[in-house]
Image (tube, rainbow, N blue to C red):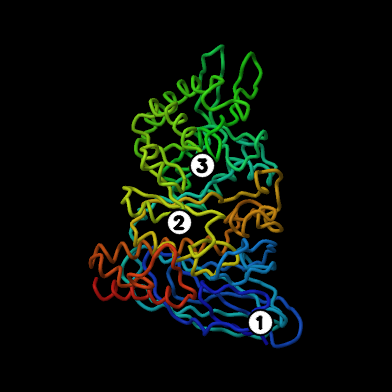
Amino acid sequence: MVTVLLQSSLEKIFLDSGAFAPAYERASALGGERFSFQLVLGRTERGTAPCKVWVESPFPGEISLFLVGQVPCQLPAYPNCGGGYLTTRPGLFPDPLFPLEEGEVPVSSFSPTAVWVEAAVPQGCPPGEYPLRCLAQCQGERAWADFTLQVVGADLPEQKLRYTQWVHGDCLAQWYQAPVYGPAYWELLGRYLTLAAQEGMNVVLTPALTPPLDTEVGKERLPTQLLDIEKEGETYRFGFSRLERFLAVARQAGMRYFEVGHLFTQWGAKAAPAVYAWENGARRRIFGWDTPAAAGGYGAFLGQMLPALTRFFREQGLEGKVFFHLSDEPGEEHLDDYRRAKELVKPYLGDFPLYDALSDPAYYDSGLVDHPVAATDRIGPFLERKVPGLWAYYCCAQGVDVSNRFLAMPSCRNRILGWQLYKFQVEGFLHWGYNFWNTQLSRQAIDPYQVTDGGRAFPGGDPFSVYPGKEGPVPSLRQKVFCQGLQDLRALELLEARQGRQAAEECLPGFGGLTFSRCPGEAGSLLTGREEVNRRLAEGR
């Protein structure tokens, strides 16, 4: 006999899970929200058999089912990572979500099978309670469990937060063996950006030049440079046809803002990125690691490229929607190098702003960075300074106390970030790895279904949030949960608009005690907080 148990989206179902949370049988959602929960399937008879799964409901929106897959991880966390992990031992972790087009999954008596249920609530959905009967049929026997979704008569407002995860074009090209900016590549890029937009991303890394990110010194990644450059002596001409197509594909997918890839190498702005140009009928690399940032003609090149590029963006009507990066994660020892790099480019940017991920407030205090993107475990000094328009980011290093999306972290520690961003009124969020399917420093490509930690370099799950499917992206559980946090943020903003800031803050898990370094240890407080937001909206409309 097949068994069905309902669990919230914040539970991670491992293959050796023996005990489960109490059945999760009802919740509420707003119009425009993508609401999720899980089915845990098992068998009482010994062995494994195929099982058909489906949902019957008068719910007016689309209901999608996904099989929760399991992936290996050798490095779940760095040493001395503190508490708040489900485990720090290597093993298999639930993460990829495979669409159930045929609605059939294998169900075993030896380990649980998890199915992710996503209900897309339409904008303007009539309020009320919608029963969702979740059925499973195995070898002629049928079982079910009933879930009740209450739709509140209010729609989520448009997302204000600017959110980016860096798309690594070389990884798309490598996995699918699709030449960069060939027909197949453009199709893939559109599909990956469409999923990203669906899950809350609205800013896209735009590689005018190949982004000098996670690249070993002296080496280079597969070029993804959008600009067509011709060099004649010391004069450069620029073609924008690929960039124009990139913008069109991104806009159609749902992107609204564009961040131009870094103009100097990572961790200090020491050198130029790899730049290719046509000269004397041949295409060759004209700048790279062997070009010091402030020498070798790179400054003169930027003096021609940046005016042409910013003029193009203005012609595209993108003022206020484009920003630039200099160097990723510069440290205290790089202040002078960063200053020289900024002096090279600032005269040509006009009102196009500069944003960079960093941890040292000296960059802001000295006026070098007007728009810092602060690491979540080092954000305190920036909050104390009341930096206007502050952004935040996390990566592999943010694994102690703060929120992150590692495979080994409970999902509530992922989702809580939306509440933290709301409380501290952070305007943007950046994460470096949408699809970084390489080892550390891009020394070699990897299979993300087999290597989830960059070759034992990063905590598992840090380098990417999507997996490669046959014709496009396979979402992850972590990506969906992060988007739920963004939906929470929007619901809090709606409550604030209707009932004031205090009403919204009273719903925060931990109330006034919530900080970036204080995350809930279990799902209940976060789910309860969101239900309280919805209750107040329902009663106060």
In depth, the one of 447 and 143 nearer the eye is 447
Which residue occupies 33% across, 48% down? 387
Q: Earlier in the sequence, mark 3 or mark 2?
A: 3
Which residue occupies 57% across, 84% down? 144
The total number of labels drawn is 3
Q: Give x and y (percent) for residue 205.
A: 50, 42
Q: Give x and y (percent) for residue 440.
A: 66, 48
Q: From mark 3 to mark 2, how far is it between C-alphas?
A: 15 Å
Q: Could you classify mark 2 by the number of other residues whose Cα lies within 10 Å: few (under 14), some (14-19), or many (20 or more)?
A: many
Q: Earlier in the sequence, mark 2 or mark 1?
A: 1
Q: Find out whether the residues at labels 2 and 1 contact each other: C-beta distance under 8 Å.
A: no
Q: Give x and y (percent) for residue 130.
A: 42, 77
Q: Find out whether the residues at labels 3 and 2 contact each other: C-beta distance under 8 Å.
A: no
Judging from the image, what secondary structure is the residue with disc 3 in? loop
Q: From mark 1 to mark 3, how far is it between C-alphas?
A: 47 Å
In depth, the one of 372 and 478 nearer the eye is 372
The kind of residue tagged 2 is: Thr
Q: Could you classify mark 1 by the number of other residues whose Cα lies within 10 Å: few (under 14), some (14-19), or many (20 or more)?
A: many
